[in-house]
Image (cartoon, rainbow, N blue to C red):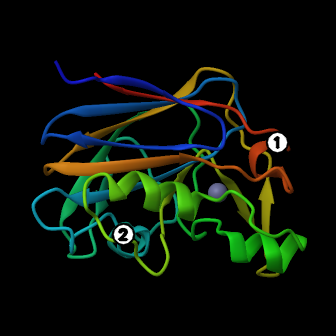
């Protein structure tokens, strides 16, 4: 039987298949932990979850239960069913080693970009030039001045989000390895993924 329940260790990534209609629950086990999520159509890797298109289609930077998330081809790819936090990020790209070098002067840092690439490689999905994930639990605050502030996630232990697949998908999730900012509350922890 296919495994349907995983614990993604702190700073690591995971990938798995989802069939149309299946529901994924992603749980922030200890709280204040971001999980970068990407999704590709399983029979055509040129179609993927697109946060920019989703914001365009919804006229919003936040999603609410009942909202559809869209692919780069403007088709519903996931539906948000429930959400105990209500604060996630659609605007930041995946962290990557070059980002840690630029912002924190750290070389060869673990990253969501690497975790997602490594996880997707198991399904033969080529690495893109960058990932633009749905950053679950990430608390990005845009100030009236236009400044962007990444603050501690609002998620408490056990908070979760549920997403229904609207097409057959390959999904990858990275438990973000950033300890340098408030992004993960300065402490990286594990994420749980479960197909209900
Ligand atoms: Zn990250």
Location of mark 2 (residue): 50
x, y percent for residue 53: 35, 74
Quadrant of image for the N terminus: top left
Furthest toward the right, the residue is 105
Q: Nearer the viewer, residue 125 or 4?
A: 125
User: Viewer-proximal residue, 166 or 111?
Assistant: 111
Q: Is residue 137 left or right of residue 73?
A: right
Please tell me in which quarter of the rendered image ligand 1 is found: bottom right
Q: Mark 2: which secondary structure?
A: loop
Query: Quick check: 6 left or right of 178?
Result: left
Res. 75 image quadrant: bottom left
Q: Position of residue 14 (x, y in %)?
A: 44, 42
Query: Is residue 155 at all visible to an observer of this figure?
Result: yes
| Dot 2 alpha-carbon crowd within 10 angstroms: few under 14, some 14 to 19, many 20 or more | many
Q: Is residue 179 left or right of residue 45?
A: right
Proximity of marks 2 and 1: CB atoms separated by less than 8 Å:
no
Locate residue 57: give its quadrant.
bottom left
What residue is drawn where x is 21% and y is 50%? 169
Q: Residue at x 43, y 75 (%)?
A: 52
Residue 79 rendering spot, x and y as whole percentages:
28, 46
Q: Is 44 located above or below residue 37 in the figure?
A: below
Q: Residues within 10 Å of mark 1 (few under 14, many from 20)?
A: some
Residue indicated by mark 1: 185
């Amino acid at each position: 039987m296919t495994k349907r329940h995983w614990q993604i260790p702190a700073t690591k990534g995971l990938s798995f298949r989802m069939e149309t209609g299946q529901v994924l629950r992603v749980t922030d086990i200890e709280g204040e932990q971001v999980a970068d999520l990407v999704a590709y159509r399983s029979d055509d890797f040129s179609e993927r979850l697109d946060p920019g298109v989703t914001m365009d289609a919804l006229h919003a930077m936040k999603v609410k239960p009942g909202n559809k998330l869209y692919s780069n081809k403007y088709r519903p790819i996931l539906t948000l069913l429930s959400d105990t936090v209500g604060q996630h990020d659609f605007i930041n790209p995946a962290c990557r080693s070059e980002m840690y070098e630029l912002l924190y002067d750290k070389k060869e840092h673990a990253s969501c970009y690497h975790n997602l690439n490594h996880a997707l490689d198991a399904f033969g999905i080529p690495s893109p030039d960058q990932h633009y994930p749905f950053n679950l639990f990430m608390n990005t605050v845009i100030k009236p001045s236009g400044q962007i502030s990444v603050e501690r996630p609002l998620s408490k232990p056990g908070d979760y989000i549920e997403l229904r697949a609207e097409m057959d998908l390959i999904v990858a999730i990275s438990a973000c390895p950033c300890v340098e900012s408030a992004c993960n509350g300065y402490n990286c922890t594990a994420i749980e993924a479960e197909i209900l």
